[in-house]
């Protein structure tokens, strides 16, 4: 196979905008080898061992994603735009089950696969319109209504989708460039950020590709690493003891897709056209190990918490501890667990072991078949009656700054402060009076009582570090204080809505009548908040969006009677009665054309097919579009007719012929005072300003202060003329900024 065959995907901006690179079609050989029988099994190592008897030769293909129903194995071919089928047991080709409709659909770079047994989903990180295609598994017929559109993933910055796995409710999608796994509602095609896995980069798994899970553990291949990483599916915690570290030993040097039947894990290889089989890992690990029913880190804060992948521990106990109880459980019920020294009281739960002064070695051995693993705990019985290793605080306060209720177990706090609060006195009391407390920054006024910390406008970080009396344990508490600014465009802080309602986890847009602020959520609802206090007012929520099919709410605007909501999946503005939430179809319209039933290559370039932000003066409604037509469209609000004379086409220099076009190439939320139009840019993390009538840039009215506030995922905006509110969809917060005054507007 040539290097061209396995070349990495194009990443140029030109290609990402839809230009098709030249691709070579590779012919599939008439005969494919079946199961590889010659390779020998490797001896067990960390993770899993090879099972060459279950390898499958897919010679002549460029295998990426794989999925099986337990009988047939489907293999996506990155170069031939086809999903080939093989008999899982024998490795023989089963061409009758091939899915060969990808090329016609524009699914030119098939990646990860996942199916519920009826529909096959196929990732495509190169397509500008659709990120995950759907097909009927039995016939290969397209099922466009089940697609995941590119702008849905793009809104989450999931711009390079690769691997897929689902539990039937949530779809997890790896991002090859972002080092993260994103989660989506499988039915609604909307985000579920609470289920994202954000721990991959820290593990070194920075180029995640294929995914597979047993519902508890998520295994992830890496585009640049010959191993498979394991994570807890619910928390993202690393499970290194379940990694596959044996891939390079058998020549599986470029893993991509993976799938398992629970016994064998199959892994594709992009270099030698083969699916490698491995025995699933986790044969001889402990699930838990405690002394006296307490985790090591709780028993002795100087020790590590128990981790099944770590076999060595050291714990200290006071001189009064003459005996300890060891309790251990294996991950598999058929494994045997043995503790040494021997249990001194078999009639009592756990292993009772006497402790001598000084070091005591305790081993726990797990045996499963011919495999064993031994854990070692060194217990030091000290000469101290009490071990003074407490590094907690009993109290923490900052005067004129409300950090909320202090809890010694909580180490991170955030708080806002008025602009008049230029400094604060930090008071920190340790639980053990013998512990050492250090506050940073240094005392700004040694002559005043207490520890003085000067506060700049914006974010200020105060840390309090506690070192235990015996110097074995350190604990750091952090308070981030945001001091309000009075400058134009500055962060107002105290007008923020800092905590959205529990269900409002995917906010996009906002609109207010000056008293109540409504916020969209991709769950299919509008949440209402008191603008002055930020309190959730559920009596004013609008919960009828999901029933209307309005799942991808991205823009809001109201005239006080009707609320219009843009939907970037349906290319439509939905309408609802603001007071009752009842849908008003008479005031709805599609943004240009109802093109949902057309194939992607038949959709007209000129139409507003990714409607995002909304704003209206009551006669004309403006709608932003961040995709192939990067501009702000205009429509007659009453009729829905497009009004090209009022469009703002000066946003993106890559797409606009206007000599003064800007770099506002990712527009989202809109708001105007009738003279200036402000436009969010989700990538630049700023608000661009334009003359509403002419479209001319008004750069002196831009908001360039969002990054400083940490407002790094801006979406929707709304203003009362004095304050500009900006939704941050990742943080679930609505930031507030001071509007410019007359001097800035000149």
Image: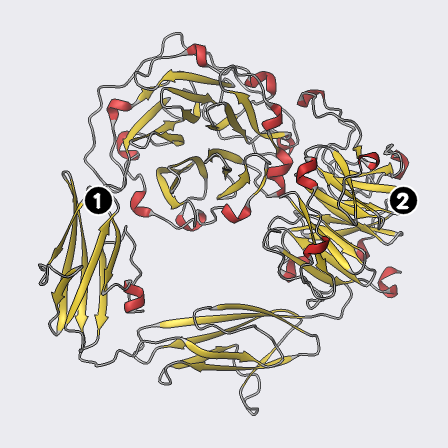
Locate residue 418, reporting x and y percent. 69, 74
Q: Pick the residue in front: 381 or 604.
A: 381
Query: Which quadrant holds the C terminus?
Result: bottom right
Residue 718 seen anywhere in this rendered image of the structure: yes
Give the residue at mark 1.
284
Callout 1 crowding tier (Cα within 10 Å): few <14, some 14–19, many ≥20:
many
Query: For numbered disc 2, what is the local secondary structure?
Result: loop
Callout 2 crowding tier (Cα within 10 Å): few <14, some 14–19, many ≥20:
some
Mark found first going from the N terminus, 2 or 1:
1
Give the residue at mark 2.
694
Cα distance, mark 2 to mark 1? 71 Å
Query: For numbered disc 1, what is the local secondary structure?
Result: loop
Report whether 236 appears left or right of 689.
left
Q: Farthest residue in the top direction? A: 30
Quadrant of residue 143 within the rendered picture: top right
User: Relative to residue 706, is residue 445 depicted above or below?
Assistant: below
Residue 664 seen anywhere in this rendered image of the structure: no
Locate residue 212, reporting x and y percent. 40, 35
User: Relative to residue 470, is residue 94 depicted above or below?
Assistant: above
Quadrant of residue 256 within the rendered picture: top left
User: Relative to residue 152, is residue 26 depicted above or below?
Assistant: above
């Amino acid at each position: 196979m040539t290097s061209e065959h396995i070349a990495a995907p194009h990443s140029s901006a030109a290609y990402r905008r839809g230009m098709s690179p030249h691709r070579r079609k590779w012919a599939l050989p008439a005969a494919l080898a079946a199961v590889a029988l010659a390779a020998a099994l490797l001896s067990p190592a960390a993770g899993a061992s090879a099972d060459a008897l279950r390898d499958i030769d897919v010679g002549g293909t460029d295998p990426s994603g794989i999925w099986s129903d337990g009988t047939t194995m489907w293999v996506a071919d990155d170069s031939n735009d086809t999903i080939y089928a093989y008999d899982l047991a024998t490795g023989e080709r089963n061409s009758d089950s091939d899915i060969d409709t990808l090329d016609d659909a524009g699914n030119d770079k098939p990646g990860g696969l996942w199916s519920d047994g009826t529909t096959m989903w196929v990732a495509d990180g190169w397509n500008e319109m659709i990120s995950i295609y759907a097909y009927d598994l039995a016939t290969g017929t397209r099922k466009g209504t089940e697609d995941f559109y590119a702008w849905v993933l793009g809104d989450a910055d999931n711009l390079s989708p690769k691997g897929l796995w689902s539990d039937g409710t949530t779809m997890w999608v790896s991002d090859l460039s972002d080092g993260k796994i994103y989660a989506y509602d499988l039915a609604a095609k909307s985000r579920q950020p609470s289920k994202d896995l954000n721990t991959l980069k820290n593990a070194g798994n920075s180029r995640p590709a294929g995914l597979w899970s047993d519902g508890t553990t998520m295994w992830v291949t890496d585009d640049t690493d010959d191993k498979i990483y394991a994570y807890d599916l619910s928390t993202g915690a690393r499970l290194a003891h379940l990694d596959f570290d044996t891939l390079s030993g058998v020549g599986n040097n470029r893993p991509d897709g993976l799938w398992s039947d629970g016994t064998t894990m199959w892994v594709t290889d992009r270099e030698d056209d083969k699916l490698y089989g491995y025995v699933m890992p986790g044969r001889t690990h402990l699930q838990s190990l405690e002394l006296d029913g307490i985790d090591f880190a709780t028993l002795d804060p100087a020790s590590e918490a128990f981790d099944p992948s770590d076999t060595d521990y050291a714990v200290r106990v006071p001189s009064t501890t003459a005996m300890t109880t060891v309790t251990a459980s294996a991950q598999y019920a058929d494994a045997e667990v043995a503790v040494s020294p021997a249990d001194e009281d078999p009639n009592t739960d756990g292993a009772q072991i006497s402790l001598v002064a000084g070091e005591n070695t305790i081993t726990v051995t797990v045996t499963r078949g011919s495999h064993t693993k031994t854990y070692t705990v060194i217990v030091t019985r000290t000469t101290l009656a009490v071990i003074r290793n407490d590094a907690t605080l009993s109290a923490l306060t900052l005067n004129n700054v409300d950090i909320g209720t202090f809890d010694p177990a909580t180490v991170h706090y955030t708080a806002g402060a008025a602009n008049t609060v230029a400094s604060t006195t930090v008071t920190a009391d340790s639980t053990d009076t013998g512990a050492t407390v250090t506050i940073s920054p240094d005392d700004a006024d040694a002559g005043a009582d207490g520890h003085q910390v000067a506060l700049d406008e914006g974010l200020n970080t105060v840390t309090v570090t506690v070192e235990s009396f015996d110097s074995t344990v350190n604990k750091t508490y952090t308070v981030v204080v945001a001091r309000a600014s009075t400058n134009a465009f500055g962060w107002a802080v105290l007008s923020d809505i800092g905590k959205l309602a529990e269900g409002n986890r995917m906010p996009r847009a906002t609109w207010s009548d000056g008293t109540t602020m409504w916020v969209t959520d991709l769950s299919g609802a509008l949440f209402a908040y008191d603008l002055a206090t930020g309190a959730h007012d559920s009596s004013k929520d609008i919960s009828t969006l999901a029933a209307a099919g309005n799942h991808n709410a991205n823009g809001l605007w109201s005239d006080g009677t009707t609320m219009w909501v843009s939907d970037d999946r349906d290319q439509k503005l939905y309408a609802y009665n603001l007071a009752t939430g009842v849908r008003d179809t008479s005031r709805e319209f599609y943004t240009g054309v109802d093109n949902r039933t057309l194939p992607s290559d038949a959709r007209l370039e000129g139409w507003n097919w990714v409607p995002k932000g909304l704003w209206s003066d009551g006669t004309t409604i403006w709608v932003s579009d961040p995709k192939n037509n990067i501009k702000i469209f205009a429509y007659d609000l009453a009729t829905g007719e497009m009004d090209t004379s009022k469009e703002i086409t000066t946003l993106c220099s890559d797409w606009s012929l206007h000599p003064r076009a800007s770099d506002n190439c990712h527009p989202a939320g809109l708001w105007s005072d009738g003279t200036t139009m402000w436009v969010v840019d989700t990538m630049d993390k700023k608000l661009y300003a334009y003359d509403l009538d002419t479209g001319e840039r008004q750069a002196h009215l831009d908001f360039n202060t969002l990054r400083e506030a940490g407002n790094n995922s801006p979406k929707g905006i709304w203003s009362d003329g004095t304050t500009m509110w900006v939704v941050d969809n990742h943080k679930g917060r609505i930031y507030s900024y001071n509007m410019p005054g007359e001097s800035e507007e000149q």
